[in-house]
């Protein structure tokens, strides 16, 4: 290629960025990221990027606003440094759950973030397992939407789980669960979830048979873990012999690890799209699968102008 490929990382998940660079056999770009005493983000690129094909790896995970602002500042710095093309690699897209007006007089924050990224200088977006696929349409620039499914499915196949049923924790996740079930030659079950008092999810019905079977709950995000806990409880109540969880983005807000510990889940698998400290991993019985090679391969294909969608065929 005429343009040099350059990989840079924000401060949100440098471990993932380093793993991606190891896959690509490339050095991580040199950049100074800091903040002023009042909390303002500051960025200085420490190498020449003029004419380069730049990839900035920065999930907008907690602290969401800090990491998002840092990404915007980085995009602006690279744009003003005459980079040829800038791709924002956002393994976890914060604000994705605010993708529609579900109540009167509320914002569509996922669209606002898309506009901010575009205005800051991003030429394209590379992301993974968006909470809602239509978010791709919020951008006026190309979006490559990856799925963590190949990583999970490859791992699960090696476990050789018997009598496997894939469980969707709500109606919105049926398409995802169906894709897993098809690839793993498993049956499908769906939890009918309703919101009760205080917006707390309550399981009403389980559609499908899990009695005497191994249940695998799949979803894009585990945050408060309330939905997961209730879903696992319902599946176990219906006679599942063992219950596992498989979630792409481990947001895991306060109190969620305790809920996972108290749940019926035997084991939970997540990706490293969001960094997890060792304490939360061990306490929550969490096993982290890396998506570094998947993201690295996608970055390489974007740089070479070859197909990204063929990764999932």
Image (cartoon, rainbow, N blue to C red):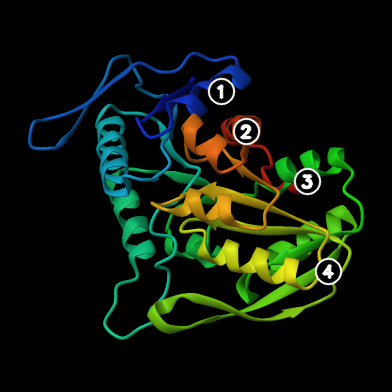
Where disc 1 sits, the SS reads: helix
Q: Compared to 144, does 288 lie above or below?
A: above
- Relative image position of residue 179 (x, y in whole percent): 77, 60
Question: The N terminus is located in which quarter?
Answer: top right
Where disc 4 sits, the SS reads: loop
**Label ID, residue 140:** none
In the displayed structure image, the side of residue 285 where residue 126 appears, left or right: left
**Residue, disc 2:** 290
Where disc 2 sits, the SS reads: loop
Q: Nearer the viewer, residue 51 or 303?
A: 303
State the residue at coordinates (58%, 36%). 302
**Residue, disc 3:** 153
Cα–Cα gap, marks 3 and 2:
13 Å
How many discs appear?
4
Instruction: Mark yes or no: residue 198 visible.
Output: yes
Q: Nearer the viewer, residue 295 or 183?
A: 183
Dot 4 alpha-carbon crowd within 10 angstroms: few under 14, some 14 to 19, many 20 or more: many
State the residue at coordinates (86%, 69%). 211
**Residue, disc 4:** 210
């Amino acid at each position: 290629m005429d343009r040099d490929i350059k990989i840079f990382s924000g401060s949100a998940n440098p471990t993932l960025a380093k793993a991606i660079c190891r896959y690509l056999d490339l050095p991580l770009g040199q950049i100074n990221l800091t903040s002023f005493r009042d909390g303002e983000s500051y960025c200085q690129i420490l190498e020449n990027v003029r004419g380069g094909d730049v990839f900035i790896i920065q999930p907008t995970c907690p602290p969401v606003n800090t990491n998002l602002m840092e990404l915007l500042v980085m995009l602006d710095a690279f744009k003003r440094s005459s980079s040829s093309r800038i791709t924002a690699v956002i393994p976890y897209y914060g604000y994705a759950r605010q993708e529609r007006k579900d109540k009167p007089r509320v914002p569509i924050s996922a669209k606002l973030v898309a506009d901010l990224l575009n205005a800051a200088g991003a030429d394209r977006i590379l992301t993974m397992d968006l909470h809602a696929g239509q978010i791709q349409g919020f951008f006026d620039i190309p979006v490559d939407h990856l799925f963590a499914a190949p990583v999970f499915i490859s791992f699960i196949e090696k476990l050789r789980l018997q009598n496997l049923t894939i469980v969707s924790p709500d109606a919105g996740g049926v398409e995802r669960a169906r894709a897993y079930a098809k690839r793993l030659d498993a049956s499908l079950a769906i939890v009918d979830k309703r919101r009760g008092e205080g917006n707390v999810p309550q399981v009403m019905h389980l559609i499908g048979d899990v009695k005497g079977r191994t249940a695998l709950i799949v979803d894009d995000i585990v945050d408060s873990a309330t939905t997961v806990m209730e879903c696992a409880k319902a599946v176990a109540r219906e006679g599942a012999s063992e219950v596992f969880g498989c979630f792409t983005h481990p947001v895991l807000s306060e109190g969620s690890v305790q809920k996972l510990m108290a749940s019926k889940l035997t084991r939970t698998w997540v990706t490293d799209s969001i960094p997890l400290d060792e304490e939360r991993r061990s306490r929550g019985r969490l096993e982290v699968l890396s998506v570094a090679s998947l993201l690295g391969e996608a970055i390489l294909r974007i740089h070479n102008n070859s197909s990204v969608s063929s990764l999932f065929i």
